[in-house]
Image (cartoon, helix red, strand yellow):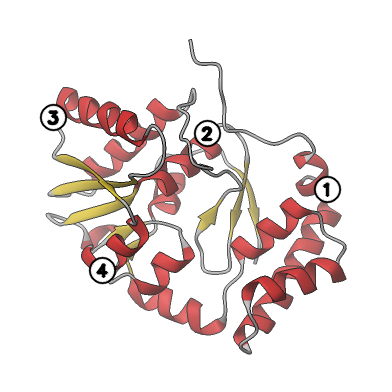
Amino acid sequence: MNNRNRGKNTGDDILFGPDKQIDKLRLAVQDIHYLLSRGYAERASSELVGNRYKLKTRQIQAIRAASASEIQIEIRKSKQIEISDLKDRTIYLDGFNILILLESLLSEAYIFQGIDGCYRDLSGVHGTYKRVNQTQRSIELVSQFFQEANLQKLIWIFDKPVSNSGRIKQIILEFAVETQLNWEVELEFNPDKFLAENAEITASSDAWILDYCTKWFNLIDYLIQQEKLSVNLIRMA
């Protein structure tokens, strides 16, 4: 029996629970947005703003993930497509990005909606992917989207160097066979570059991918709205 969750870290309720902390984080995101829009580097901007507001490491992670420059927001919005655009199309999923975000969301971890409208969490793979209690439900949510969108095909892209990527590939393919879904799973050494260069439509919340991909769909936002998911959500804008 797998007893793992991808939920909150110890201390997250102190860092992200109180209204005064959220107000401070939103001000910090506004400041980073201002700096990024004027050409300042992301790391330098987040460290400067983090020092100003006396933020902890995980809070700085959150504001960095939620921030973007004005040009980045414009670029991302110009490439975003709607559910109605997906009928009979193929979509590529940024595998670990989408899967871990859904697992975190279902585990009641804090989820942050950035100023670009995308959702991000504070979990990471760190070289090894570990299946959790919410993995199966996360895959099922993607299958509901696949059917509701009337997609022709869905292709999961995972990081080949990450330990257990082959195992999650097997789990997803077995599920697809059982439920008769037209899914593929591919392992790539550089999935971000692959998605940016090869996918006509991508589902991801990774900032770099959103900046360089052809078109993208906000899958997490769709699932939250459509499936009425309960989310421990902090809107950063």
Pick the residue in front: 72 or 143: 72
Q: Examine the rendered structure and indicate whether residue 177 appears above or below residue 24.
A: above
Between the residue at mark 2 and the residue at mark 4, the CA separation in whole angstroms equals 31 Å
Q: Examine the rendered structure and indicate whether residue 164 appears above or below residue 122.
A: above
Residue at screen point 30% across, 33% down: 166
Residue at screen point 71% across, 36% down: 9
Between the residue at mark 1 and the residue at mark 4, the CA separation in whole angstroms equals 42 Å
Decide: marks 1, 4 in contact (CB < 8 A)? no
x and y percentages locating residue 209 in the rendered image? 39, 65
Split into 4 quadrants, where in the image is the C terminus? bottom right
Between the residue at mark 3 and the residue at mark 1, the CA separation in whole angstroms equals 45 Å
Q: Which circle's residue, 3 or 2, is located before the other in the chain? A: 2
Residue at screen point 49% across, 38% down: 229
Determine which residue is flagged by label 1.
18
Q: Which circle's residue, 3 or 1, is located before the other in the chain? A: 1
Q: Which circle's residue, 4 or 3, is located before the other in the chain? A: 3
Decide: marks 3, 1 in contact (CB < 8 A)? no
**Can you see residue 228?**
no
**Can you see residue 4?**
yes
x and y percentages locating residue 230 in the rendered image? 55, 37
Q: Residue furthest top?
A: 1
Q: Label 2: how many residues lie within 10 Å, few (<14), some (14-19) or many (20+)?
A: many
Q: Amino acid at mark 4?
A: Glu
Label 2 SS: helix
Determine which residue is flagged by label 4.
197
Determine which residue is flagged by label 2.
106
Pick the residue in front: 191 or 153: 191
